[in-house]
Amino acid sequence: MDVGRLREKLKKFTETTTVVVDKKERDASRKHLNKCVQEWRTRKNKCMDVLGGILESCPSSAKELLDEIGILTDEAEGVKIPILK
């Protein structure tokens, strides 16, 4: 093995401010993110179901109702729910 190459590699790790996250912490963070995204989807679906029920008996359009209530949708704001594995 090239000692000089290994010393340069070690120097990169010791001189940078990069925080190395261990696998256990990374997996816990991903699990939490997946849980949050799933909750986001669930709440969005429930909200849209309720709004759909209100719109059945409301003479105004969906956009007008959302504006009147003050609800900003993901689509109107250009936000997409992430697709996670």
Image (cartoon, rainbow, N blue to C red):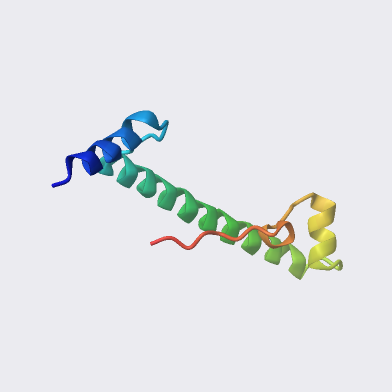
Query: Furthest residue to the left?
Result: 1
Nearer-the-camera pick, 66 or 51: 66
Nearer-the-camera pick, 56 or 15: 15
Percent coordinates x, y for residue 15 in the rendering: 37, 29
The quarter of the picture where residue 21 lies is top left
Instruction: Residue at 79% x, 66% y: name it.
Output: 62
**Above or below: residue 68 compared with residue 8:** below
**In the image, 74: left or right of 65?**
left
**In the image, 46: left or right of 36?**
right
**Above or below: residue 16 compared with residue 65:** above
**In the image, 37: left or right of 11?**
right
Instruction: Residue at 43% x, 60% y: name it.
Output: 84
Nearer-the-camera pick, 59 or 1: 1
Nearer-the-camera pick, 10 or 56: 10
**In the image, 17: left or right of 2?**
right
**Above or below: residue 81 compared with residue 7:** below
Instruction: Residue at 52% x, 59% y: name it.
Output: 82
Instruction: Residue at 26% x, 41% y: name it.
Output: 24
Percent coordinates x, y for residue 1 in the rendering: 13, 47
Percent coordinates x, y for residue 26 in the rendering: 33, 44
Percent coordinates x, y for residue 43 in the rendering: 56, 54
* Quarter of the C terminus within the rendering: bottom left
Query: How many labels, in total?
Result: 0
